[in-house]
Amino acid sequence: MLERRWIIGFTCLILVGLLHFVCFDLIMLYDVQKSTTAAPIELLWWSHHFSFVYDEVRQCGAFECRVTNKRQRLASARAVLFYGTALKKGDFPLPRSPQHLWALLHGESPRIVTYAPSDDFLQHFNFTSTFSRYSDLPLTTQWLPSAHDLISMDYTMSFDFKSSNLNVASPSVVFLSSDCDTMSGREHYMKELMQHINVDSFGSCLHNKNLPASLQKDYMDNLYSPKLLRFLSRYKFMIAIENAVCEDYITEKFWRPLVVGVIPIYFGSPSIKDWQPQKKSAIFVNDFPNAAALGKYLMELSENKTEYDSFRGHKLNRSHPIQNEKLLHNLMTYRYHTGDLTLEGSLFHRFECAVCKNATYRGPIRRANARHNNCPLVPIYAPLESKKEPHSLVRWRSAMKVGQCQARILKTFFRSNKPYNEADFEAELNRRMDDNRCSTDPKLH
Ligand SMILES: *[C@@H]1O[C@H](CO)[C@@H](O)[C@H](O)[C@H]1NC(C)=O
Ligand SMILES: *[C@@H]1O[C@H](CO)[C@@H](O)[C@H](O)[C@H]1NC(C)=O
Ligand SMILES: *[C@@H]1O[C@H](CO)[C@@H](O)[C@H](O)[C@H]1NC(C)=O
Ligand SMILES: *[C@@H]1O[C@H](CO)[C@@H](O)[C@H](O)[C@H]1NC(C)=O
């Protein structure tokens, strides 16, 4: 009963939110129509992330935009769109006309595009959609399928049921990861933790158990398959260490255990506590001096039903499941999450429409900054008992340094505003590496 009331209340709030957006659109549209001709604003995808050519008119609420990836439309484009993981260092549309807004869609941690977090790079964009809460279309909660999943009891097992699971040794921890070389030092930390407590590791990293055959094939592609969720829900704890530490870079690693009533053991975004459904919904690696201390705590917690369930208020407190105002607000207003399977709900569609609406906005000059992709330029890793840094860190640190160097080179090319290509870029990079100008620049922030 209480749950139904909660859902109805939630639906009403969403409707109010939608009404707000529609009114806002109409007011903006009125402003625009006073001053523009009938031809729709053009958005050009510069990145080659789709192999097919397209050119179509998009209806975005009350706005209309022509979206294409035909590069010959550059002259008439109002905004040029870039997809982070498909960026090419030698392929930007220069010279850039003053009317060209640049818009960046990028949801990845810096491991793939190491220059993306640099201010030297970001400052050339007028609109961003990243995991950061400060970006124009934030994707912070994109990996949470829906607010309903967070409070639903569908996969939630009782403490007693979890304790009676004889296949799992105390304290009942599951680890599922197949990326074994991370900036956050995940595998190094886990190696230490697994010397102190039992952990069932099903992925290829520190693998010690096999997934049921029915799950082996697609557990990486289908992160929220019912079968997988049911499987994970038998555990008390799940390791949730992101592959890199960036503010608001929060993936399914955090949300999935919360969805299935399992306590996440989290390391990643430094301000993660801003996003938990209640004051205490997860265990944070940073709250413990080392893996031994964390292991000891997990052993105690796994035996104490009252204390264990106090982490699961979002499941067990039917009248007040989500007590975090910031998260509630985000869930009511966010415009993209992976659980939305409609065409209009796709990430590209949402991004195009957000840019479409914003391209008509006239106001002070807008440019992105480092907060829009808030990753420390020197990687941060989970604290090791030895107080040593993980051996792979040397390589990640130098990758990030080269990234900064690349960002500075891009800035130079963008400023000179003349066409250049990949070979020009590589030549400049080699010149700077040879002069030691890449690694000695002390501008680390
Ligand atoms: C279990 O945790 C509660 C607090 O939630 C505490 O009051 C109680 O003493 C604990 N029980 C044991 C046996 O440690
Ligand atoms: C649910 O949360 C509210 C608000 O914090 C609290 O007053 C109430 O006691 C909780 N109910 C249960 C059953 O824990
Ligand atoms: C467009 O961007 C400006 C400046 O960031 C912002 O104030 C405005 O709300 C945005 N409009 C839309 C529709 O996103
Ligand atoms: C877009 O960003 C560029 C580069 O930072 C800047 O020169 C330009 O003025 C910005 N345009 C608008 C409309 O804000």
Image: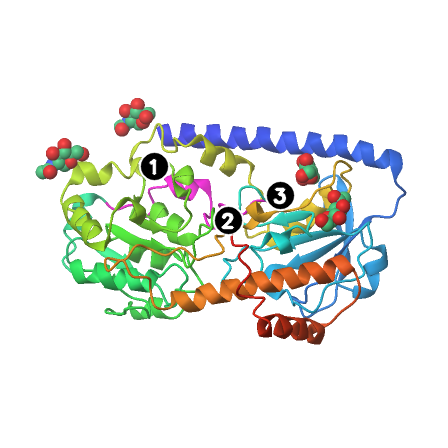
Q: Is residue 390 above or below residue 30?
A: below
Q: Which residue, given by chain and number where applicable, does mark 3 sit on?
A: 136
Residue 436, located in which quarter of the rendered image? Answer: bottom right
Residue 36, located in which quarter of the rendered image? Answer: top right
Work out whether mark 3 precedes mark 1 in sequence or the reverse, and give the earlier one: 3
Q: Which residue, given by chain and number where applicable, does mark 1 sit on?
A: 314
Magenta-drawn stretch contains 187:
no
Question: Mark 2: few, some, or many residues within 10 Å (few <14, many ≥20)?
Answer: many
Q: Splitting the image into four quadrants, where does ligand 1 fall?
A: top left
Q: Residue 187, how many percent across, how many down?
A: 32, 64
Residue visible at 53% across and 46% down in the picture: 132
Q: Residue 76, how many percent across, how many down?
A: 85, 55
Q: Is residue 115 left or right of residue 317?
A: right
Q: Whole-Å distance between the Cαs marked 2 and 3?
A: 14 Å
Q: Can you name the residue that lies furthest to the right here?
A: 37
Residue visible at 87% across and 33% down in the picture: 34
Q: Whole-Å distance between the Cαs marked 3 and 1?
A: 29 Å
- Residue type beneath disc 1: His
Pointer 3 residue Cβ closer than 8 Å to ligand 3: yes
- Residue type beneath disc 3: Asp
